[in-house]
Amino acid sequence: AQKITQTQPGMFVQEKEAVTLDCTYDTSDPSYGLFWYKQPSSGEMIFLIYQGSYDQQNATEGRYSLNFQKARKSANLVISASQLGDSAMYFCAMRETGRGAQKLVFGQGTRLTINP
Amino acid sequence: DTAVSQTPKYLVTQMGNDKSIKCEQNLGHDTMYWYKQDSKKFLKIMFSYNNKELIINETVPNRFSPKSPDKAHLNLHINSLELGDSAVYFCASSQAGPGRTKVAFFGQGTRLTVV
């Protein structure tokens, strides 16, 4: 069974600092994908970044990067130069590939607050 | 040009009523989903459809019935609403394929309140 764990219920960071949001996962499937989503107070789910289990390099998307450590089964999100607009809930999710496994399993989320 | 749109955004109804939430995607994706987000913000899949065929039904009460008239639409009908059904329901879609193409894009959510 899949499992995603986000151990930080809440994080408080000063504006312009970098922040790392932790995510560990557990799966027996050798092929999987890892995702991060942002949910601002307005409620929508915004895709941020994707990492495939066979990708050789860590994914980057603008100020977002994913610190993928396969042996440790961790996929931490790094936000550089944080902004007030980064305040939101952040969810780590995992998807297995393969027929019939068409779902994302989410972690509990981390509420990030950026202080001015 | 909204990619995944669901209506209504808010739904307040009395216990025992029947209600529907509609979802449409214009991304050309072949897979659509319904997720439920509870009061603690935990997201859990309810259903998944691929090309109008039900793939996943995650132990959801049979009061919930998804319907996919075509691969661009996935509606959720809920019978005999209960207080515990109050939650935010998200529709999402994705495309089968390698790597990043599998990214699921979400609608804006429907906040259902049962009183």
Image: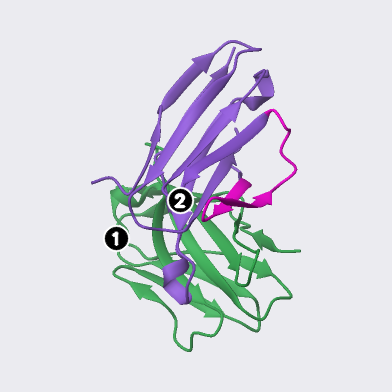
Label 2 environment density (alpha carbons within 10 Å; few <14, some 14–19, many ≥20): many
The image shows residue A101 at horizontal and vertical percentages of 64, 64
Q: Nearer the viewer, residue B49 or B92?
A: B49
Q: Colour of chain A?
A: green
* Disc ID at residue B41: none
**Chain ID for label 2?**
B
Q: Is residue A103 above or below residue A43?
A: below
Instruction: Give the residue type at disc 1.
Output: Lys
Do tags 1 and 2 sit on the same chain? Answer: no
Can you name the residue that lies furthest to the bottom here? Answer: A56
Q: Secondary structure at mark 1?
A: loop
Tell me the residue that label 2 is attached to: B71
Q: Is residue A12 visible?
A: no
Tell me the residue that label 1 is attached to: A16
The image shows residue A64 at horizontal and vertical percentages of 36, 68
Left or right: B42, with A86 as reference point: right
Q: Are marks 1 and 2 in contact (CB under 8 Å)?
A: no
Q: Is residue A34 above or below residue A43?
A: below
Residue visible at 40% across and 28% down in the picture = B9
**Chain ID for label 1?**
A
Q: Colour of chain B?
A: purple
Instruction: Give the residue type at disc 2.
Output: Lys
The image shows residue B28 at horizontal and vertical percentages of 36, 57
Label 1 environment density (alpha carbons within 10 Å; few <14, some 14–19, many ≥20): some
Q: Nearer the viewer, residue B72 or A90?
A: B72
Q: Secondary structure at mark 2?
A: loop
Residue visible at 64% across and 22% down in the picture = B79
Span shown in magenta:
B45-63
Q: Nearer the viewer, mark 1 or mark 2?
A: 2
Left or right: A57, with B66 as reference point: left
